Image (cartoon, grey):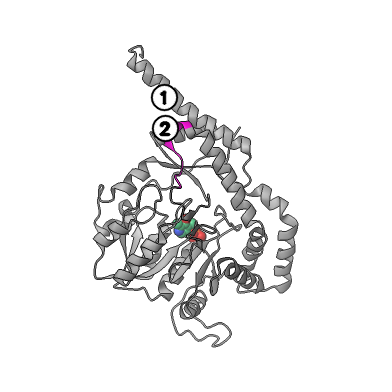
Amino acid sequence: MAVRFFSGAGSLERRWPRVRELVDEALDAATFVNGPLAERLERTIEGYTGAGHAIAVASGSDALIVALEACGVGPGDEVAVPVYTFFASASSVVHVGAEPLFVDIMPGTYALDVGDLERRLTPQTRAVMPVHLFTQMADMPAMMQAAERHGLTVVEDSAEAIGMAFNGTLSGRFGRAGTFSFFPTKTLGALGDAGMVVTDDDEVAERCRRLRNHGQVPNERPYVWDVMGINSRMDELQAAVLLARFESLDEDIERRAHLARRYDEGLARLHGVADPPSITDERATPVYYVYLVEAEDRDGLVEHLGTRGIETEVYYPRPLHLQPCFAYLGHRVGDFPVAERCARRAVALPLYPDMRDDQVDEVCAAVVSYYDRGRARLRAVQAGDAR
Ligand SMILES: *Cc1c(COP(=O)(O)O)cnc(C)c1O
């Protein structure tokens, strides 16, 4: 039986009456952008995170652009970015006119390596963007100390990390600003693109509100543009879906954890061959946005699962320093060994609240069968009877 990499149809159907109610509200208000539901979602995210301000935007990528610019990052500045992350972490830096300073990651947490950051810093380095990938946050106390030592502004890319915490503080709440993505597959997902910036800084918040709306101060100076902004407002229909989905966020996170524990058990005997996520820092509160395995012969495993109808995603097959569009930075293979190793070994197995327990079992059985088959072949070769 096939296992999709992601599906949200079942849970959306269960919540449809509530979604419908909120969509009806949006239709009645007839505002569609910059409307009451997006505002309600902003207040909801402020309540959830404890942030002084939440500013709704059109995507997680835009949230990064708006947050960086609102923090004063621009031409002549370098922003330290992990070299192993989604493209938008680095492209946002270029979109505000600055340059990414790539930094290697830590094995296990996939977070920006603070030691490597300190080795690569230059006088132009103005900000650092820790990215919380897959399951657990970066060691933010260490990151904040390093940022303080070097006078760097911290903008957290929490696109994947809603609900994750470190020392009890939620992701997005350590830096001067933090950003979330509500891309459909994310832990809190819309039915299209949407994102959010959170900050305690009144000025940064004010600038974000302006920048997302072409640079215009809403309701104050209509059709006067003091600064250059972009069109990046959240539309009301996405806000309606997100408000409905937010009501079960905790439950969804719990369901994800349950499925992850089932994977942990199902794959336990593959240690050293296909390693499940290691949550070793007890200060970190994980959220299983994806279930990332580091696997021997990853491409062979992906193919094996594919022939059984099991979809996987390789996050991320090519680190950013080896992307054609960043060739101008002059990096080459070998510059970021930890990231390059992850790019060869990492694969995300399906994990989402709609998944059934027996589907996890099916994926585990397929993974185990791949390596058992491999071992059987290896034994045969060693015995000299393989032709
Ligand atoms: C998803 C994601 C983004 C971009 O979010 P979009 O809403 O898709 O624009 C940025 N950074 C990371 C780490 C992501 O996973």
Locate residue 234, reporting x and y percent: 58, 68
- Callout 1 secondary element: helix
Q: Find residue 52 and report its image quarter.
A: bottom right
Query: Is residue 137 something that shows in the picture?
Result: yes
Q: Are marks 2 and 1 in contact (CB under 8 Å)?
A: yes
- Callout 2 secondary element: helix
Ligand 1 closer than 8 Å to label 2 CB: no
251 shown above or below 237: above
Q: Name which residue type carries label 2.
A: Gly
Q: CA distance from mark 2 to mark 1?
A: 10 Å
Of the pair 221 and 292, the residue shown nearer to us = 292
Q: Find residue 44 and report its image quarter.
A: bottom right
Q: Give the labeled residue for mark 2.
A: 300
Q: Which residues are magenta?
A: 269-279
Of the pair 141 and 7, the residue shown nearer to us = 141
Locate residue 191, reporting x and y percent: 61, 57
Q: Give the labeled residue for mark 1.
A: 374
